[in-house]
Amino acid sequence: MNTATTPYLSLCSYNITFHLVSTSTWKPLAFPPPTKRCHSLRCRLSSRSSTAHVAVEDDLQAFLQVLPYDLREVLLNDPRRAQLLEVVLDLGRLPEARYLGEQGGQYLRSTEVLKEELEYAQDAVGEFGGDNRAGIEGTLHRISAIRSRKGEIVGLTCRVGRAVSGHIDMVHDLLAYGKSILFVGRPGVGKTTVMREIARVLSDEFHKRVVVVDTSNEIGGDGDIPHAAIGGARRMQVPEPSLQHRIMIEAVENHMPEVIIVDEIGTEA
């Protein structure tokens, strides 16, 4: 696969800090010299992002339909629902909500999760893939399963997916370079959210031919029609995580992309 002619935006989840690198040479990208008004790149990017207008769309109603009825009522009346990160449903344990920027979680009721409630949630979402992830069609929400030795689902992590626009000013300059970029960071810091917005900006504002290789349907959402948050970018779904590299090669050979966006790189091409 010729990576010299096709820029890549890639995502990995590790417990280390954020970096931007070029996949062709694996050396740090060369930044432009500082301007007279600002003596560092960090200062210049911070001044730009501080004036950006950020819009958030979470489609929380669709997310709540997966949960037991009593939990929906609790979360709808929760003043922190805009910061809701995920809901954990484990068989025989109390249901728990976790919030952005907070340590630990909060129990939503005093009774344990029943098997019937897990079965209801399974019926409400799409089919689980080989990575034990599913979604809600037309949304960016992610449902991840924990299975018993018999293969039965005994736990669900229901994560809220949000489309956030107007928050990539800090890397907007880098998109014009035409170089590859790698996003690395611990889970939950917003790597996928940024890449989703980058897909939209590159396709709609830079007018690039963008193909998203969507390993777990997290960038473009569940279902055959990709979420509007990726703009005019095209999306190729990955049947199994082990086939990720094959879909990347297929994207290059068949669809003439100028940019390929890949999430959760876990296979060797």
Image (cartoon, helix red, strand yellow):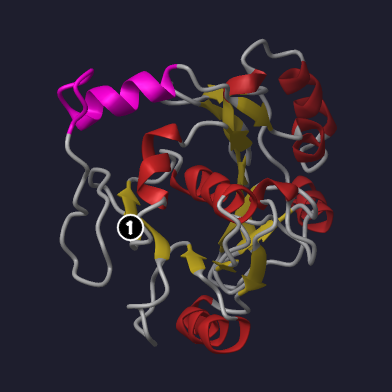
User: Residue at 42% of width from left, 24% of height from top?
Assistant: 49
The reply to whether residue 130 is in sight is: yes
Q: Position of residue 53 (x, y in %)?
A: 57, 21
User: Residue at 49% of width from left, 67% of height from top?
Assistant: 259
Q: Position of residue 202 (x, y in %)?
A: 55, 53
Quarter of the figure with residue 96: top right
Q: Is residue 96 left or right of residue 122?
A: left
Is 253 rendered above or below residue 119? below
The boundaries of the magenta stretch are 34-50
Q: Please tell me which residue lies in front, 77 or 112.
A: 77
Residue 88 is a magenta residue: no
Q: Position of residue 142 (x, y in %)?
A: 63, 50
Q: Amino acid at mark 1?
A: Leu
Q: Is residue 219 left or right of residue 263?
A: right
Q: Which residue is mark 1?
A: 182
The local secondary structure at tag 1 comes to strand
